[in-house]
């Protein structure tokens, strides 16, 4: 076992973990952060996307021990860490623009979109499509997902909300 200490959704946590435990397993099984979805276990789908030190990562591709001393934000923590617990503008845009269907991929899509908009607050449609290409959706044609990200980019409060 290896001792890790990290911040998850604003709370300091300390745990003993197997060195081979994936971050997605740690978040779901040890911390109950089930909004971080296990989709493919191969880092292809992006359903498990979280923020590690403010940047999106596929948590099925990161060991929990690699998060030692770092800050993780999950979909559950995105609203909690945003202005008084209100929905993050990207979450609100997905709601308003129907950027989800079954909802399975939505947490990863939202987390990737937040990172994309932090890097490029005013992307074109092509830039959104390219920036979201590592996240797969089996239900939609991506039209409303792209529309949601573009809508979020037009809000004045999106930038800087890592």
Image (spheres, helix red, strand yellow):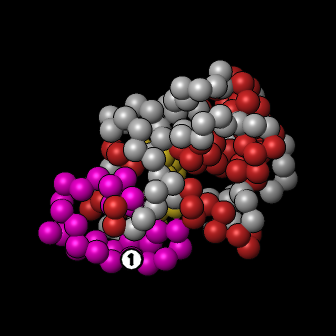
Asked if residue 114 lies left or right of residue 153, the reply is left
Where residue 125 appears, as percent x and y from the top left, is: 73, 26
Asked if residue 100 lies left or right of residue 76, the reply is right
Which stretch did the figure color magenta? Answer: 1-28
Element type at mark 1: strand
Residue 80, quarter of the rendered image:
bottom right
Residue corresponding to mark 1: 13
Residue 147, quarter of the rendered image:
top right
**Looking at the image, which residue sits at the far left?**
1
Which part of the image, by quadrant, shows the N terminus? bottom left
Asked if residue 5 lies left or right of residue 150, the reply is left
Residue at the (39%, 71%) spot, across then down: 6
Where residue 30 appears, as percent x and y from the top left, is: 34, 67
Which part of the image, by quadrant, shows the C terminus? bottom right
Residue at the (33%, 38%) spot, across then down: 41
Residue at the (60%, 41%) spot, across then down: 103
Residue 65 covered by magenta stretch: no
Residue 26 covered by magenta stretch: yes
Residue at the (40%, 44%) spot, across then down: 38
In front: 45, or 157? 45
**Above-or-below relation of 11 to 30:** below
Q: From this viewpoint, is residue 133 visible? A: no
**Looking at the image, which residue sits at the far front?**
102
Where residue 121 appears, as percent x and y from the top left, is: 73, 44
**Above-or-below relation of 52 to 70:** above
Q: How many marks?
A: 1
Q: From this viewpoint, is residue 155 visible? A: yes
Tell me if mark 1 has few (under 14), some (14-19) or many (20+) residues whose alpha carbon lies within 10 angstroms of its own.
some
Where residue 77 appears, as percent x and y from the top left, is: 57, 64
């Amino acid at each position: 076992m290896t001792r890790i200490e990290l911040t998850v959704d604003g709370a300091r946590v300390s745990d003993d973990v197997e060195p081979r435990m994936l971050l997605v397993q740690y978040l779901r099984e040890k911390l109950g952060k089930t909004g971080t979805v296990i989709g493919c276990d191969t880092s292809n789908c992006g359903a498990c996307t979280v923020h590690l030190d403010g940047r999106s990562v596929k948590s099925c591709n990161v060991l929990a021990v690699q998060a030692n001393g770092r800050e993780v934000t999950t979909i559950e923590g995105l609203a909690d860490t945003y202005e008084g617990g209100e929905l993050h503008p990207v979450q609100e845009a997905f709601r308003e623009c129907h950027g989800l269907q079954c909802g399975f991929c939505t947490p990863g899509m939202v987390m990737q979109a937040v990172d994309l908009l932090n890097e490029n607050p005013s992307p074109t449609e092509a830039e959104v499509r390219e920036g979201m290409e590592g996240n797969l959706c089996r239900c939609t044609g991506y039209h409303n997902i792209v529309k949601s990200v573009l809508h979020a980019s037009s809000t004045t409060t999106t930038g800087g909300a890592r």
